[in-house]
Image (cartoon, rainbow, N blue to C red):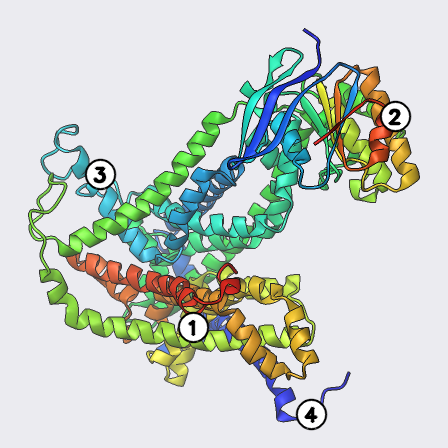
Amino acid sequence: MSLPLTWRSLMPPILPALTLLALLGPVMAGLVGTVMAGFGHLPAAGLTGPSTEPFRALWNWPGIVPAVRLSLQTGVAATLISLFVVVLLVAGWAGTRPFRLLLRLLSPLLSVPHAAAAFGLLFLIQPSGWIARGLSPWLSGWDRPPDLLLVQDPMGIALIAGLVAKEVPFLLLVTLAALGQIDSDGRQKVTTALGYGRIAGWLFTVLPALYPRIRLPVYVVLAYSMSVVDVAMILGPNTPPPLSVQIVRWMGDPDLKMRSLASAAALAQLALVVSALMVWRLAEVTTGQIARHMAYRGNRWAGDGWLRAASLGLGTVSVLAILTGLLGLAVWSFAARWNFPAVLPEALSLKTWHRSAPVALATLGTTLAIAGSATLIGLVLTIGCLETEERRHLRLTQRGLWLLYLPLLIPQTAFLPGMQTGLLNFGVDGTIWAVVLAHLVFVLPYLRLSLEGSYKSWDARQAAVAAAMGASASRIFLSLRLPMLLAPILTACAVAMAVSVGQYLPTLLVGGGRVQTLTTEALALAAGGDRRVIGVYALLQAAIALLPFALALALPALVWRNRRGMQHG
Amino acid sequence: MDDGLRLNTVTIRHLDHVLVSLDLHVAPGAILSVMGPSGSGKSTLLAAITGQLSRDFTLSGSITLNGRNLTELPPQARRVGILYQDHLLFPHLSVGANLAFGLRPGLARAARRVQVENALADIGLEGFHDRDPHSLSGGQKARVALMRMLLSDPALLLLDEPFSRLDAPLRARMRELVFAFASRRRLPTMLVTHDDEDARAAGGAIVRI
């Protein structure tokens, strides 16, 4: 079928092309910039390469071995633990009442920005935190905060805990979405009748079909946990910090020459993540072989009650940690005097909020403007792509899926330094639009992933009926598809807003310190240690990420209050 | 005590509405056919016996199998073998590994392999150990599913319309095979179907619900 060559027919393909450019352009350009600076070519700092001097300097940095070890160990541990908790939880409890309850608490936590969750956890577990207060002095005997390394410990245990608490909701929701695509009930019925314990039956028969569908999200978690900056600055050790944090420190050095060192370190970080992903892939294959070997032995593992209980316990702890953490942020932001062993402040006051309001409101405005713009642009591009694919009967291939995930798999620290130096050359770094562009890279994949399912499963017969009545493709799109997909579109927007609000490194590096959002502001306050102000900013950050979700739930219910057929889709 | 399956004044309610109310006995080696239109609660009755009844249903009365009260046991401990309409072979395991998955634990790997090979010969599938289940015909898949269940050494056989996906000649052969295994092992067998021919061919008592 040949399409008439009008501007209308030329319109759609432009959007997919633009989407690809917005998604991969900054990543690729950034990587090129990082490679050049890493090999000593940085004209802005008066360096002309190529040279291996930056790598030599990196190798001679005394912190290199501990920094690499920390990145590796926190990243791998956080991913393994999160995956274990999620797999055991779903294997042991999917479809039960406690599971549904846990899920209802967990889903909104997905949108809580990493930094806010990390601050909440910090306020909970630090020596003067809520847990220590709850145990003092009656049990611990402490009448002042104990001198213990409970956070920022050299092993990175607090950092791992913070990552796990945030990645469990993510992996759980991803797993449940994938579970709907395979016949897990049938498999479970058979394994139960054959006498297998719930968890063993699930691991032997459901997981092998499920894992390939959650592989990419697991890789995202691994890449992210190995290179995270904001959570590591809050909960991770300082001397030395994980490699990613050190890269950001070097990037922020007033001496521009340090950026070549930062870029060399960024390339090392990229190599580290790529190697970890490859080792992980090998481990998947080996685990699969061992599992098939064990399945042949026929052991039933029927007494798995303790393991089920443990998994539910772990899931509950991870939910409660974030929830009480957020509550702690709120209490601190309203606290008047609050001395150590007291569980609650002596009085509540609005003083901190009054004091912070002028700056906080301006920052809130910037945060919303950036998140709103990135979401809106991303939404137009994403729906444009989906509609074009629909009209041309294209499907997202496996390769397309990898492209979509690429910005989430390549460590931010690897391409953002290059992107910053690139923008520096054009003189557009430090503008709000540059930041929107950087956020778009991370917003686009999540928009696409959350819209994909509902867009593709929309009943095409509706369109066929309308077309038979003479409706044009545009009319079908505007007056049927969009309104009927109102709820999923709003949810996708809420996800996109939350993703943008949570971005730390893109805002910091591309904004060049001149664009402040709630996240960068909260992180800047972290060093000062004023818990009341941190409470204000982290709470605002969480609220602004959660609010769109509430709206995404409420609006369709309001709009369709007289349309029963639209209320459960 | 070896007296087969007994349902003593079993009543299954959905919310407050009585779905099934039954009192019956299936002796070892005997076959009972339960017939009824779809939605009459046949599958629900089987789920009550396997212990996989969903929470929306309530069960009263007792179900005993060779004197053991099944309702007090977790589903894994009931030793109830069930065959469904779909063969539900695990696609990531070879045909032989599917059978080994059903085979009771114990024995070394080599001895298990021998047992699995023997089982394959019993259903006319010699040399199929390493085959991909996907490459099997519908009738072959049904036989593997049957054998996988038998290898778990059940004390009761439940058949949830297991023949309805097969075409007529295959259906007759599969029925014969299942009933032959059941009577040779003296298993009490309950067949749930909406097909008169299946029930007649079973040759046992027929209950309509």
Residue carrying label 1? A375
> To which chain does the residue with label 1 belong?
A
Residue A131 marker: 3
Q: Are marks 4 and 2 in contact (CB under 8 Å)?
A: no
**Residue furthest toward the top?**
B1
| Vertical order, B1 against A427 (above or below) | above
Real-space Cα separation, disc 4 to disc 2, in angstroms: 66 Å
**Which residue sits at x=30%, y=52%?**
A118
Local SS, label 2: helix
Label 3 packing within 10 angstroms: few (<14), some (14-19), many (20+): some
Same chain for the residues under marks 4 and 1 in the image: yes
Query: What's the amino acid at mark 1?
Result: Thr
Residue carrying label 2? B121
Query: What's the amino acid at mark 2?
Result: Ala
**Which residue sits at x=67%, y=67%?**
A395
Local SS, label 4: loop
> To which chain does the residue with label 3 belong?
A
Real-space Cα separation, disc 1 to disc 3, in angstroms: 38 Å
| Vertical order, A359 against B198 (above or below) | below
Query: What's the amino acid at mark 4?
Result: Leu
> To which chain does the residue with label 4 belong?
A
Residue A526 is situated, as x and y percent measured from the top left of the image, at 22, 57
Viewed as shown, does residue B100 lie left or right of A49?
right
